[in-house]
Image (spheres, grey):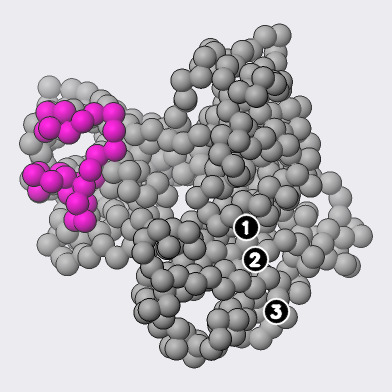
Amino acid sequence: MTERSFDVVVIGAGPAGEVCAGRLADADLQVAIVEQHLVGGECSFYGCMPSKALLRPGQVLAEARRVRGAAEGVDGLDVQATRERRDEIIHNLDDSVQVPWLEERDIALLRGHGRLTGERTVQVGDETLTARRAVVIATGTEPAIPPIPGLREAHPWTNREAVTTHDVPSSLVVLGGGTVGVEMADAYASFGTQVTIIEAGPRVLAREEPFAGDEVCAALAEAGVLVRADTRATAVSREDGRVTVELDDGSSVSAEEILVAVGRRTLSAELGVESFGIEPGRPIEVDDSLRVPGHDWLYVIGDANGRVLLTHMGKYQGRLAADRILGREAPLRSDGALSPRVTFTDPQVAAVGHTLASAQEAGIDARAVDVPTSANAGGSFVGPGALGTARIVVDERRRVIVGATFTGPEINEALHAATIAVVAEVPLDDLWHAVPCFPTRSELWLKLLEAYGL
C-alpha cells in the first residue's frame, strides 16, 4: 500500500474531468486524475464523436442531392469508408493520443477505480491519494437498461455498440426517440438498414419544440424509418439471430438487432459517497458552486451531478469548479434551460433556453416568432427545399430572448449567436444593431426580428 498527496484529485478523465484538471494544473497545482477506462471519456469514444462520424457522410450526400449541379454526379454512400473514418476519429478505442495532453501539464494519471475512503481521501487499487484542497467527482454516466422482461437477456446494443460495431444489420429496432435514438436511426437508415423506432411518448425529441420533433419524424419517414409513437415495449426475446419486441398494443416488431436509447444512469453507486450521507446510485446533488452541501472540499461536475447531461456543459462546469478551487469568482451563468443542445439528424435541431411551453410553465410572458430556416438569401444555397423552422421565444416584459430553436440542414452553427443572446440577456433593441452579412444564413436573425416587429 502506497500513499501520495496532491492538491486536487479528480475522479474521471472524461471531458469535464480533463478540463478541470488541466485548468488547475495550468495554475501550478499538483493534480491527479483517476480513470478506469479510456482517457477522453464517453463522448470521445462512444458518443458525440463517433456518432457524428457515422452521420456526416449520409448528410453530405443528402445536401448534394438537393443542389442542382451537384446532384447529377452523386454516387451512393460507402459504408466501409464511413466505418474506417469513424475508427480514425476514435483512434480504434486507443486513448494513448489523449495522454500527452495530461503529461504536458504534469497531471498524474492513475488507471483504476477511484473510491472515497475518507475526507479528501481516494483509494485507487493499492494506492491512497490524499487531496490537500479538493476532490472532484467527474465520473459521468452509462446507458440505462429499462426493466423490460427479456431485454438484458437479448444482449441489446447501447450507444457504445451502435457507434463502434463493424457490422451493419439488415434491420434495427430502436427503443427511445430521444437524441441518441433519432441520430442512430438516421445513420443506420443511410447505411440501408430498415429501422423502427419505439417511442413511449407522443413524438420524438419530446423535450424540444413540437415542430422540431415533427420535422425530424417526417425526414426519418422519408428515409424509410418507421416511428411507432405512444407505444411501449413490454417484452423482448432473441431467437435464431433475431430480436422480437412485444408492444403494449398487442403487436410486435422483429429485427436483427435492438438498440436501447432511453436515457443514462449515474455511476455513483461504487464511489463510497454513502459515507458522507449521499445516496449512492443517484445523481449527486450540488449547489451553484458545484460543491456537495456540507462538504466544501467535494465537487461534482458533468453528468455525475445530473444537472445537464451534455458534454459541453460538463466542460463548462469543470472550468467553474477549477476556478472556485483556485479561489476565483466563478458565477454559474449557464445551467438547466439555458444550456445549448444539438441533435445532429437531417434536419438538425439546434436549441438553447426555453421552448414556448417551458417558458409559459415558468411564468414568463412569452411570445414565439417563427420564420422558415430557408427564408433568406443565404438559405437558398443550403438545403434548398428541405424542412426547417427558426423560432425565438421572447420574454415580452423584459424584451429579451429566453429561447431559440433552429431546424434544418447544417443549422447547428447558427446556435451560438442565440446562446449569446439568451445567456447574456441581450435586449432586442440592441440585438437589432448586430447586422448579419448578406448573403448568409445568419440573416435568419434579421427575418426573426422583422417578424417580431422591430
Judge by depth and name the residue closer to the eye, 407 or 104: 407
- Judging by the rendered image, the residue that carries numbered circle 2 is 389
Question: At x 46% / y 36%, what residue is drawn?
Answer: 263
Q: CA distance from mark 1 to mark 3?
A: 20 Å
Q: CA distance from mark 3 to mark 2?
A: 12 Å
Q: Quadrant of residue 14?
A: top left
Q: Secondary structure at mark 3?
A: loop
Question: At x 30% / y 55%, what residue is drawn?
Answer: 317
Amino acid tagged 3: Asn
Residue 27 point in image, percent of width and height: 19, 61
Front label number (1 vs 3): 1
Residue 326 in sight here: yes
Graded by Cα atoms within 10 Å as few (under 14), some (14 to 19) or many (20 or more), the crowding at tag 3 reads many
Question: At x 45% / y 70%, what residue is drawn?
Answer: 366
| Quadrant of the drawing holding the N terminus | top left
Q: Are marks 1 and 2 in contact (CB under 8 Å)?
A: yes
Mark number displayed over residue 376: 3
Front label number (1 vs 2): 1
Q: Are marks 1 and 3 in contact (CB under 8 Å)?
A: no
Q: Secondary structure at mark 1?
A: helix
Earlier-in-chain disc, 3 versus 2: 3
Residue 297 point in image, percent of width and height: 11, 46
Earlier-in-chain disc, 1 versus 3: 1
Q: CA distance from mark 1 to mark 2?
A: 8 Å
- Judging by the rendered image, the residue that carries numbered circle 1 is 211
Residue 191 in sight here: no
Query: What's the magenta region?
Result: 274-300
Q: Quadrant of residue 194?
A: top right
Judge by depth and name the residue closer to the eye, 314 or 404: 404
Residue 34's place in the image compared with 16, above or below, is above
Q: Are marks 3 and 2 in contact (CB under 8 Å)?
A: no
Q: Secondary structure at mark 2?
A: strand
